[in-house]
């Protein structure tokens, strides 16, 4: 199979075939997971014959136009878990918030001054 050129996760398409490191077909890309605010690739959801599986970013070896290659062999890939709704979601309550300290106020003031000097504020 012609893999095509190496690509960024930003242009990886749904339906792209996914193979294990030892050349076995695992499935196809269902969804690309990333944090838009920080531009960090988080992983893939792969549609397999056994359902959807989550592949963490470090387990993705190569992204190409027409193929994704994992860093996992077929035996390791069999143990991939199902994706969770949002494993990184967190919430804070008023009890979780720490009152401002003098250091926080100084740091915030310095940040505002820097933003004014640098044209960001």
Image: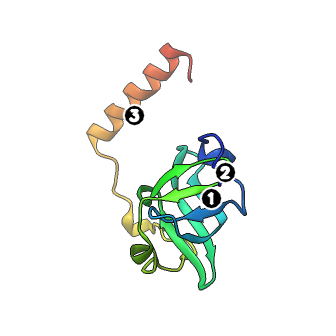
Residue sitting at the far bottom: 50
Q: Is label 3 in a helix, a strand or a loop?
A: helix
- Mark 2–mark 3 contact, CB under 8 Å? no
Q: Residue 12 carries which label?
A: 2
In the picture shown, does residue 101 fall above or below 86? above
Q: Residue 75 carries which label?
A: none
- How far apart in space, not on screen, are marks 2 and 1 (Cα)? 7 Å
Q: Name the residue under label 1.
A: 32
| 54 horizontally vs 27: left or right | left
Q: Which of marks 2 and 3 is nearer the N terminus?
A: 2
What colour scheme governs how the chains and residues are painted in the rendered image of this protein?
A: rainbow
- How far apart in space, not on screen, are marks 1 and 3 (Cα)? 36 Å
| 23 horizontally vs 49: left or right | left
Of 74 and 37, which appears nearest the observer? 74
Q: Which mark is residue 108?
A: 3
Residue sitting at the far front: 1
Across and down, in percent, residue 27 comes to 62, 71
């Amino acid at each position: 199979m012609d893999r095509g050129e190496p690509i960024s996760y930003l242009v990886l398409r749904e339906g792209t075939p996914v193979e294990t490191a030892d050349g076995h077909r695992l499935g196809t890309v269902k969804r690309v997971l990333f944090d838009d605010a920080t531009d960090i690739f988080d992983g893939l959801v792969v549609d397999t014959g056994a359902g959807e599986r989550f592949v963490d970013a470090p387990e993705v070896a190569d992204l190409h136009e027409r193929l994704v290659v994992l860093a996992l062999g077929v035996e390791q890939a069999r143990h991939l878990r199902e994706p969770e709704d949002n494993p990184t979601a967190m919430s804070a309550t008023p009890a979780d918030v720490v009152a401002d300290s003098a250091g926080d106020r100084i740091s915030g003031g310095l940040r505002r001054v820097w933003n004014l000097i640098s044209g960001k504020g």
